[in-house]
Image: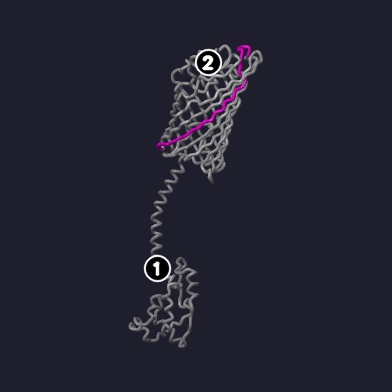
Amino acid sequence: MKVNSPWCSPQTLLSSSTVVLTILLGINPCVAEDLRSEQPQPKLVGVSELFSLQVDADQTVFSKSDLQNIDQLDAKSIHRPQDWDVISAADTPLLQMADRLDNEPAEMEQSSESDNDSGQTESSDKTESTSNNLWRSGRSDGHAPIGVMGDHTHKAGEVMFSYRFMRMDMAGNRDGTTDLTPAQVLQQFPVTPTEMTTDMHMLGVMVAPTDELTLSLMAPYVFKSMEHITRMGTRFTTQSNGFGDIRLMGLYKILDQDRQRIHLNAGISFPTGSTNQRDDTPAGLNQVLPYPMQLGSDTFDLHPGITYLGQSEGWSWGGQALGTIRLGTNGNSYRLGNRLNITGWGARRWNNWFSTSVRLNGNTWGNISGADPRLNPVIIPTADPNRRGGTRLDVGLGLNFLVNKGALAGHRLAIEFALPVYQSLDGPQLETDWLLTVGWQKAF
């Protein structure tokens, strides 16, 4: 039964500290008066006991931590308004809870803004999806096997430095697809080569003025050594070394979609390699060396080509066709034969830092046009311009490493070892036994 009380008068509500209870706790002061009438003796109660929480199943007004904070308050009497001054303390749990409730609209507003930003995130995801659909170089298989030149382009402003060491070992002679013994060659010529080793140190730099165009410069330094035997059984060695022909190449990207790329190769080499190398031989001191022992072509040469690249999540593949077209005749009255190189490869990416590759590499090259008047083609087959052409197919196996952490992050190391599986030579001519390429690359 409701008891009439001055608590219910507007004057009392406005003047009494009970208004604090009304505002903060949502309790009708008249109901509080009823409680006082029914319980004449003052009772100290916990604040949490004043709450009769009606919480919907799908909506939480206060968290468990809030209720724990409320219970931590000292017991206060509802008949002593001065006890409620504790609410004015800035560090009380109730005020902290009230501050949180006041901030809920702002949080809801931020949530709304977050929802609005979801459209931008979705757009960003689409952009990322598009980016993920492009061919990527930043993988352990992101470059072709190290024996391939001009295989990839760069983003605008990027620069890449590289170094390659290449060794080619040749032993034994061949005419067509038939192997010849030294004795068989000596039936035709007084002198025959038996072995040859070529070591090349190749320094390279690539610069990308735009996303579509990458420029490449390669400078080789070459060491050559050839073993001989004469009909009299005399053995001797000739050597030469120096810079080869420097090559400048432009790579122009024409396709970049669906994790595939195509770019055009257009290059020119300069006659920086000597064709006047000399050494001592049984025929005399300081003799002009035959064609294979010279270091360059002594002509300007064009290098047109095209390169294709493809990728999936764990695999990559590619192919390249690159030609060499000799321009004019050099100062020694001859021109080396034109050359065509066609290669294709596949690589397996095992993780972020290691991949393996297999490559087929085909070369065909022509005989020499003209002749160096200082050489006698009757003495040794390497001096005959009509015995320099041929075709060869190699199979190469490669290991590729990409450093992902530490001071060497971004450095690439690679090795490729190749063996010929087919050779047909306009011989007698030294055949190739194996090829090794070791290299380092770093982009900035």
Residue at coordinates 40% horizontally, 37% vertically from top-left?
Answer: 210
* Residue 38 higher or lower than 223, as above or below: below
User: Furthest-front residue in view?
Assistant: 285
Mark 1 lies on residue: 102
Residue at coordinates 35% horizontally, 84% vertically from top-left?
Answer: 12
Classified by dominant secondary structure, the portion drawn in magenta counts as strand
Q: Which residues are magenta?
A: 186-210
Between 85 and 193, the one nearer to me in the picture: 193
User: Furthest-right residue in view?
Assistant: 233
* Residue 13 higher or lower than 373, as above or below: below
Which quarter of the figure has residue 37? bottom left
- Frontmost of labels 2 and 1 is 2
Mark 2 lies on residue: 385
Judge whether residue 91 is colored magenta: no
Secondary structure of residue under mark 1: helix
Which quarter of the figure has residue 92? bottom left
Q: Looking at the rendering, in which quadrant would you find the N terminus?
A: bottom left
Instruction: State left or right for residue 373 relative to residue 174.
Output: left
